[in-house]
């Protein structure tokens, strides 16, 4: 089975729906077609669609020359083939994100070729009996809901994010991440306090401040106030240009620090674990370099005693690949989920409905061959952009 054609298309909610409030901004998607008639699907989050369209296509394009005509033997071989060919280019940024999307689509094809879901080909469920209580078997994947609001700071932010948590909890979701972005340190603590009060002592609560701080002392003061609220992790307190502030904060708080939404390749993640003392890393399945690279991140993080809680502030096209990594990983208690139930995004709702269902707050292990996400062509037609 060989790669015969690379197809790109762009979907989105359109300019009337704000991406910062849950809308799907113009999103490039990739289909790999084989000479046997099979297709593998992925999305390319946060790369300008024009870049994807210019570099993924016929034999004259940047990635077309590397992938067209290649035999689907094993995804890791194709990943290494492309990686080695990029030795004299940037090997970071959009180039690796697009490679990651192609890699996910290749894994999709590989699973279809062998008639098995991708998580089994990654290595099967690796959680042993000492990590998984017998009363929770069979193993499933637990999503945490990322909560944003229409405004940042103050009472409007508090009330809307808490109301969304309460609604999602009533639907059976079990874990939540509040986002007090562009807010004062006082508002960060107050939102977390109200969210904990709404959830009670049992629900899992995370806090993401979106690179809000530049100085360690302020972040330390905030974390010390949050410690009594049983925060599962504190995400991106600082920009990720340097691991040093993370390491200094980690030494002064008991709350695990998290990062990784824009991390590319295992090397960026391992640097933040080793030098930044980050104990929760959050690779996106395409941004990090694909399922091939995400599997390596799991292996290296496990050896260092860190957790991998994959990120996904995108659609359930990406979310489907995330579920497969979580099914394989023994250090992935949660995956990120942008719940369509509380966001005004028609496309997000339809893509979630076409994906893996959440029942009782968990996602069952996929059974279809490959990644198993089937994107209805009607959705592509109605939400096509460009």
Image (spheres, rainbow, N blue to C red):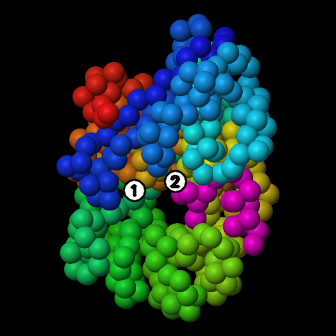
Image quadrant assignment for residue 4: top right
Q: Kindly identify the residue that appears in the image at 28 percent across and 65 percent down.
A: 149
For this rendering, which residue is in front, 330 or 118?
A: 118
Chain part drawn in magenta: 259-275
Decide: is 189 above or below 315. below
Decide: is 137 above or below 59. below
Query: SS for tag 1?
Result: strand
Q: Position of residue 96 (x, y in %)?
A: 63, 45
Q: Is residue 263 magenta?
A: yes
Q: Residues within 10 Å of mark 2 (few under 14, many from 20)?
A: many
Q: Kindly identify the residue that appears in the image at 57 percent across and 39 percent down.
A: 98
Decide: is 23 above or below 146. above
Query: SS for tag 2?
Result: loop
For this rendering, which residue is in front, 311 or 242?
A: 242
Residue 200's disc is none
Q: Residues within 10 Å of mark 1 (few under 14, many from 20)?
A: many
Image-based side of 25 in relation to 216, left or right: left
Image-based side of 339 in relation to 234, left or right: left
Image quadrant assignment for residue 352: top left
Image quarter hosting the C terminus: top left
Image quarter hosting the N terminus: top right
Q: Kindly identify the residue that appears in the image at 60 percent across and 51 percent down.
A: 93
* Mark with earlier residue (2, 1): 1
Q: Kindly identify the residue that appears in the image at 38 percent across and 34 percent down.
A: 10
For this rendering, which residue is in front, 363 or 210?
A: 210
Q: CA distance from mark 2 to mark 1?
A: 11 Å
Q: Position of residue 328 (x, y in %)?
A: 65, 41
Residue 311's disc is 2
Q: Position of residue 73 (x, y in %)?
A: 74, 19
- Residue position marked by numbered label 1 in the rendering: 145
């Amino acid at each position: 089975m060989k790669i015969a054609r690379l197809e790109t298309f762009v979907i989105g909610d359109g300019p009337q729906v704000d991406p910062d409030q849950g809308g799907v901004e113009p999103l490039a998607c990739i289909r790999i077609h084989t000479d046997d008639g099979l297709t593998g699907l992925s999305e390319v989050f946060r790369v300008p669609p024009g870049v994807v369209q210019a570099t993924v296509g016929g034999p004259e394009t940047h990635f077309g020359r590397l992938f067209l005509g290649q035999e689907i033997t094993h995804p890791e071989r194709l990943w290494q083939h492309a990686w080695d060919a990029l030795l004299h280019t940037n090997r970071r940024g959009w180039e690796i994100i697009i490679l990651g999307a192609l890699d996910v689509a290749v894994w999709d094809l590989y699973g279809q070729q062998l008639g098995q879901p991708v998580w089994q080909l990654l290595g099967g469920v690796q959680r042993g009996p000492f990590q998984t209580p017998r009363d929770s078997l069979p193993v499933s994947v637990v999503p945490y809901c990322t909560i944003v609001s229409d405004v940042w700071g103050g009472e409007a932010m508090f009330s809307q994010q808490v109301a969304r948590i309460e609604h999602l909890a009533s639907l059976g979701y079990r874990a939540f991440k509040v986002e007090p972005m562009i807010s004062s340190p006082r508002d960060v603590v107050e939102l977390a306090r109200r969210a904990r009060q709404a959830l009670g002592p049992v629900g899992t609560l995370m806090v993401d401040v979106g690179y809000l701080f530049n100085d360690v002392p302020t972040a330390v003061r905030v974390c010390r106030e949050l410690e009594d609220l049983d925060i599962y992790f504190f995400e991106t307190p600082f920009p990720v240009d340097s691991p040093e502030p993370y390491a200094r904060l980690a030494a002064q708080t008991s709350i695990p620090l998290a990062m990784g939404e824009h991390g590319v390749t295992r090397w960026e993640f391992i640097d933040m674990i080793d030098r930044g003392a980050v104990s929760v890393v959050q690779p996106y399945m395409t941004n990090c370099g694909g399922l091939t690279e995400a599997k390596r991140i799991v292996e290296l993080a496990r050896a260092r005693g860190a957790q991998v809680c994959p990120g996904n502030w995108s659609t359930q096209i990406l979310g489907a690949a995330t579920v497969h990594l979580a099914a394989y990983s023994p250090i992935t208690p949660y995956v990120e989920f942008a719940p369509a139930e509380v966001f005004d995004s028609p496309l997000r709702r339809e893509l979630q409905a076409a994906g893996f269902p959440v029942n009782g707050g968990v996602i069952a292990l996929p059974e279809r061959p490959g990644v198993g996400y089937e994107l209805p062509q009607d959705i592509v037609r109605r939400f096509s952009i460009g």
